[in-house]
Image (cartoon, helix red, strand yellow):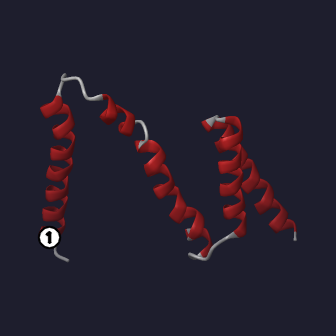
Protein backbone atom coordinates (compact mmCIF):
# COMPACT_ATOMS: atom_id res chain seq x y z
CA UNK A 1 0.00 0.00 0.00
CA UNK A 2 1.48 3.33 -0.99
CA UNK A 3 1.67 6.43 1.17
CA UNK A 4 -0.80 8.20 -1.14
CA UNK A 5 -3.31 5.37 -0.72
CA UNK A 6 -3.03 5.54 3.06
CA UNK A 7 -3.58 9.31 3.04
CA UNK A 8 -6.52 8.96 0.66
CA UNK A 9 -8.14 6.43 3.00
CA UNK A 10 -7.54 8.69 6.01
CA UNK A 11 -9.08 11.69 4.23
CA UNK A 12 -12.12 9.74 2.98
CA UNK A 13 -12.77 8.28 6.43
CA UNK A 14 -12.36 11.72 8.01
CA UNK A 15 -14.87 13.26 5.62
CA UNK A 16 -17.28 10.35 6.21
CA UNK A 17 -17.00 10.77 9.98
CA UNK A 18 -17.59 14.50 9.65
CA UNK A 19 -20.69 13.97 7.52
CA UNK A 20 -22.15 11.44 9.95
CA UNK A 21 -21.70 13.83 12.87
CA UNK A 22 -22.88 16.83 10.87
CA UNK A 23 -26.09 15.02 10.01
CA UNK A 24 -27.04 15.09 13.69
CA UNK A 25 -25.45 18.31 14.87
CA UNK A 26 -25.72 20.52 11.81
CA UNK A 27 -28.89 19.40 10.09
CA UNK A 28 -31.03 18.54 13.09
CA UNK A 29 -29.47 21.23 15.25
CA UNK A 30 -31.86 22.57 17.82
CA UNK A 31 -34.97 20.90 16.49
CA UNK A 32 -36.63 18.61 19.02
CA UNK A 33 -36.30 14.95 18.13
CA UNK A 34 -39.28 12.62 18.29
CA UNK A 35 -39.63 10.56 21.46
CA UNK A 36 -39.05 7.26 19.62
CA UNK A 37 -35.67 8.52 18.34
CA UNK A 38 -34.59 9.58 21.83
CA UNK A 39 -35.68 6.21 23.22
CA UNK A 40 -33.60 4.37 20.63
CA UNK A 41 -30.56 6.60 21.19
CA UNK A 42 -30.56 5.65 24.88
CA UNK A 43 -29.69 2.09 23.87
CA UNK A 44 -26.70 2.99 21.69
CA UNK A 45 -24.07 2.38 24.38
CA UNK A 46 -25.75 -0.85 25.45
CA UNK A 47 -25.59 -2.07 21.86
CA UNK A 48 -22.06 -0.89 21.03
CA UNK A 49 -20.19 -1.81 24.21
CA UNK A 50 -20.75 -5.60 23.98
CA UNK A 51 -19.64 -5.47 20.36
CA UNK A 52 -16.36 -3.90 21.44
CA UNK A 53 -15.78 -6.18 24.42
CA UNK A 54 -16.91 -9.57 23.04
CA UNK A 55 -13.91 -10.09 20.71
CA UNK A 56 -11.55 -9.28 23.60
CA UNK A 57 -13.25 -11.92 25.72
CA UNK A 58 -13.61 -14.65 23.11
CA UNK A 59 -10.32 -14.16 21.22
CA UNK A 60 -7.96 -12.31 23.59
CA UNK A 61 -4.60 -11.24 22.24
CA UNK A 62 -2.98 -12.23 25.56
CA UNK A 63 -3.65 -15.90 24.72
CA UNK A 64 -2.83 -15.68 21.00
CA UNK A 65 -6.51 -15.63 20.08
CA UNK A 66 -7.47 -18.77 21.99
CA UNK A 67 -10.55 -18.60 24.25
CA UNK A 68 -9.51 -18.18 27.86
CA UNK A 69 -11.67 -19.47 30.73
CA UNK A 70 -10.46 -16.67 33.02
CA UNK A 71 -11.74 -13.95 30.71
CA UNK A 72 -15.00 -15.77 30.04
CA UNK A 73 -15.61 -16.16 33.79
CA UNK A 74 -14.79 -12.47 34.32
CA UNK A 75 -17.27 -11.51 31.60
CA UNK A 76 -19.95 -13.69 33.20
CA UNK A 77 -19.23 -12.14 36.60
CA UNK A 78 -19.52 -8.69 35.07
CA UNK A 79 -22.86 -9.45 33.44
CA UNK A 80 -24.17 -11.12 36.60
CA UNK A 81 -23.11 -8.26 38.85
CA UNK A 82 -24.53 -5.73 36.42
CA UNK A 83 -27.90 -7.45 36.35
CA UNK A 84 -27.92 -7.90 40.10
CA UNK A 85 -26.72 -4.46 41.23
CA UNK A 86 -27.76 -2.30 38.24
CA UNK A 87 -24.46 -0.49 38.74
CA UNK A 88 -21.89 0.00 36.00
CA UNK A 89 -19.06 0.52 38.48
CA UNK A 90 -20.15 -2.49 40.52
CA UNK A 91 -20.21 -4.66 37.40
CA UNK A 92 -16.78 -3.44 36.30
CA UNK A 93 -15.38 -4.03 39.77
CA UNK A 94 -16.83 -7.55 39.93
CA UNK A 95 -15.39 -8.40 36.52
CA UNK A 96 -11.96 -7.02 37.41
CA UNK A 97 -11.95 -8.86 40.72
CA UNK A 98 -13.01 -12.13 39.07
CA UNK A 99 -10.31 -11.81 36.41
CA UNK A 100 -7.68 -11.00 39.06
CA UNK A 101 -8.69 -13.93 41.26
CA UNK A 102 -8.91 -16.48 38.44
CA UNK A 103 -5.60 -15.42 36.85
CA UNK A 104 -4.00 -15.44 40.29
CA UNK A 105 -5.32 -18.95 40.98
CA UNK A 106 -4.02 -20.12 37.58
CA UNK A 107 -0.59 -18.68 38.37
CA UNK A 108 -0.44 -20.64 41.61
CA UNK A 109 -1.20 -23.92 39.86
Q: Is residue 90 above or below residue 1?
A: above
Residue under the point 45% across and 49% down:
47
Snapshot quadrant of residue 81: top right
How many marks on residues? 1
Q: Is residue 13 above or below residue 80?
A: below
Snapshot quadrant of residue 27: top left
Question: In the image as oriented, which residue stretches furthest toward the right?
Answer: 109
User: Is 79 left or right of 65, judged from the image as shown?
Assistant: right
Which of the two residues, 108 or 38, is positioned nearer the viewer here?
Answer: 38
User: Is 13 left or right of 63, judged from the image as shown?
Assistant: left
Q: Which quarter of the image is occupied by the N terminus?
A: bottom left
Residue 93 image point, x, y percent? 69, 42
Instruction: Report if residue 93 is visible in the image.
Output: no
Residue 13 image point, x, y percent? 19, 56
Residue under the point 67% across and 63% down:
72
Which of the two residues, 31 or 107, is positioned nearer the viewer here?
Answer: 31
Residue under the point 20% across and 32% down:
25
Residue 44 image point, x, y percent? 40, 43
Amino acid sequence: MTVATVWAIIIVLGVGTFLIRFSFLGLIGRRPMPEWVLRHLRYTAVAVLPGLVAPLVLWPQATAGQPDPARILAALATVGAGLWTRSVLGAMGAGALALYLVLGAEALL
